[in-house]
Image (cartoon, rainbow, N blue to C red):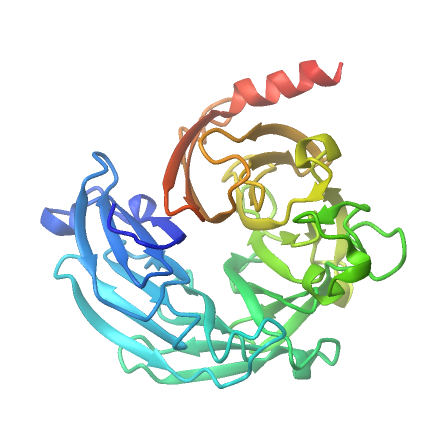
Amino acid sequence: HPHTDSVSSVAFNSAYVPPEAKGKSAQHLVAVGSYDGSLALYDAGTGQLVQLLDGPTDVEFVDFHPKGGTVVLAGSISDGTVWMYHTPTMKCLQVFVGHEGGDGQGGGGGGVSAGTFTPDGKFALSAGMDGTLRIWAPRTGVCRHTFRLAAESGAGDARAGLTCLQVDGGADGQLAVAGSEDGLAYIVHLTGKKIAATLRHYDETPGAAGGSGGGGMDVDGEGQDGGDEELLRSVEAVGFASKAVNPNWVATGGVNGTLKVWDVTHGGHGQCRQVCRPPADEAGGHVAGVTRIKWHPTLPLVLATYTDGATRLWDARDGSLVTTLTGGHAGVMINGMAAEFVGADAPGGGTAVVVTAVDDGGVRVFEINIASAVEAAAQARQ
């Protein structure tokens, strides 16, 4: 592969390519971004490199347009820009510029940490280390609205950067969720231009789930007494459940090792339904922070990737661990993850094809037979 630094992000376009598409518009692609600034497009069927795109200083995230899958978005934590490409022509269509020079608690400058498109494809969204969530007009590159989440909520830290972003929540699909370095996740209504809920993933109450120390384990072998506790607050992954599961459920994952499942219909602070934390023996006595989240499209199951190189599948109904995958990069941080679910509507939930972007510069592909994994977990609990 062409990457000379850690691989940061990965995305499929397969779910968006219509059956009637022809020629290059019918290509099923995997986009892979790297901290070396490379954005590579691979053939999803063969794994062959299709094109290497020029773009930002580094690539922090990639995502495809939901209408046709022929437009891809990529953003930079270093130079604060978001680039939009047309994959059939391999041309850059737009560069979005506007995130300010706030350095966040992580010292990320005015960088862009996450981005995506609205479900109808009409707007691009970006979340930045300046603490803002921005809505962009793709054709003109103009910022149509800026959410200053900490100030508008009155609950967050104005110095904290945003780390992650997902859309398509709520019954109308207009909810977006952004995670923050200050341990909060903000739910916003995109058309209403308002904050709908503020979720406190990091709970400072001693002994509380998701609170200080992530259950008493160390991060990277460092004890908390001598470390910076702010580093354990950050929410690094977010994701809404599908409408087939419950569009008002959202999962948040933090560097403190917890994955929480929330119901956002319960007031302005949501209701935490479940807390999922890897067993101490799996994590080797250290906190394994959550890096990415992906829900199964028809079942209440959540895929999560971790800083210890593991991919874990959780049951959102009771918070139980279904299975853990570690092959290929145990102990090496997973930066990005994408998953395609084949036969998800079939009894048992089909097969999950999981692609991970890893800190060692590699990309790994896993398959999970959902029914077999759920059955094996049930037998193990008996």
Q: Quadrant of the C terminus?
A: top right
Query: Is 105 left, or right, of 167 in this rendering?
Result: right
Quadrant position of the N terminus in the picture: top left
Image x and y of residue 75, in percent: 38, 68
Q: Quadrant of residue 283?
A: top right
Determine the residue positioned at 54% across, 18% down. 372
Query: Is residue 352 shown above or below 160?
Result: above
Q: Nearer the viewer, residue 245 or 166?
A: 166
Rendered location of residue 226, percent (x, y) = 78, 61
Please name the residue shown 19% across and 56% down the image.
52
Image x and y of residue 263, in percent: 71, 53
Residue, far right: 206
At a point 35% along the width and 85% down the height, the residue shown is 142
Residue 281 in the figure: left or right of residue 304: right
Q: Is residue 344 visible?
A: yes
Image label count: 0
Residue at the location (65% across, 45% down)? 288
Write down the quadrant of residue 87 in the picture: bottom left
For the question of whether residue 68 can be seen, the reply is no
Q: Is residue 376 above or below residue 328?
A: above
Question: Hey, which residue is sitting farthest left in the picture?
Answer: 23
In this view, the residue in front, 183 or 246, is 183
Residue 201 picture quarter: bottom right
Decide if residue 43 is on the left or right side of residue 308: left
Whether residue 306 sits left or right of residue 5 in the image: it is right
